[in-house]
Image (tube, grey):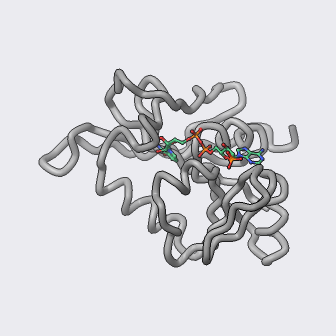
Amino acid sequence: MIISIIVAAATNGAIGQAGQLPWHLPADLRFFKNTTWAMPVIMGRKTYASMNKLLPGRFNIVITRNADWQQEGVVTAASLEAALAIAAAAHFKEAYIIGGGEVYRQALPMAGQVLLTRVHTEPEDADTFFPALDTADWQLISDEAFPADDKHAYAFNFQRWQRQNPSV
Ligand SMILES: NC(=O)c1ccc[n+]([C@@H]2O[C@H](COP(=O)([O-])OP(=O)(O)OC[C@H]3O[C@@H](n4cnc5c(N)ncnc54)[C@H](OP(=O)(O)O)[C@@H]3O)[C@@H](O)[C@H]2O)c1
């Protein structure tokens, strides 16, 4: 199973603010949709709550410690490992970890690649963060820069990072 993290993080690592994204970047939402389409997407219950709907065209798996939590069209898992096992049992060869902070922290040591949208801002009121990638473990494979424009308040880069030592 290839475990891929997909995340948009500010220059200071910020990814969330009061349960929401700190920005609205339509190009990043499009990239997210195209990349994860038809794939299993694994998320924490708080990230699901922030969207408050399932992601269409994807196999939605929500991690929660609450055994009573359920939503129509969503598969519930009691741990990240259980979520990955569910995706594997459904014959997927790759799963996308889509957040949030608590789930990214647990998934990072297991992940083989990180699709990182680096957003060039430092939101002051952020409360959720993505860790810095250690270049001893992670190699930058591609990096595409986009300027701010009338639809995007901040410049951003689409980066693909690959684990250097997948056997570890
Ligand atoms: N910028 C981005 O790319 C991006 C992407 C996604 C989310 N976000 C942002 O991130 C924020 C949410 O992140 P967050 O860290 O607060 O929450 P989160 O990671 O989305 O969800 C945390 C919840 O997931 C469940 N959980 C986590 N680990 C578990 C485990 N090992 N076993 C069972 N359940 C587990 C628990 O749910 P229960 O409490 O139900 O037990 C926990 O409270 C929001 O602001 C959101 O907008 C940003």
Furthest residue in direction left, as rendered: 150
Residue located 45% across and 66% down the image:
33
- Relative horizontal placement of residue 43, taking residue 87 as reference (left or right): left
Q: On screen, 136 above or below 46?
A: above
Ligand 1, image quadrant it occupies: top right
Furthest residue in direction front, as rendered: 68
Q: How many marks?
A: 0
Residue located 87% across and 43% down the image:
167
Expressed as whole percent of the image width and height from the top left, the position of residue 9 reads: 46, 36
Residue in the foreground of this view, choosing between 153 and 44: 44
Expressed as whole percent of the image width and height from the top left, the position of residue 43 reads: 63, 54
- Relative horizontal placement of residue 6, taking residue 135 as reference (left or right): left
Can you say which quadrant of the picture contains the C terminus? Answer: top right
- Relative horizontal placement of residue 146, taking residue 59 as reference (left or right): left
Can you say which quadrant of the picture contains the N terminus? Answer: bottom right
Residue located 54% across and 66% down the image:
36
Expressed as whole percent of the image width and height from the top left, the position of residue 129 reads: 53, 30
Q: Quadrant of residue 59?
A: bottom right
Q: On screen, 3 above or below 71?
A: above
Residue located 72% across and 52% down the image:
64
Expressed as whole percent of the image width and height from the top left, the position of residue 88 reads: 82, 69
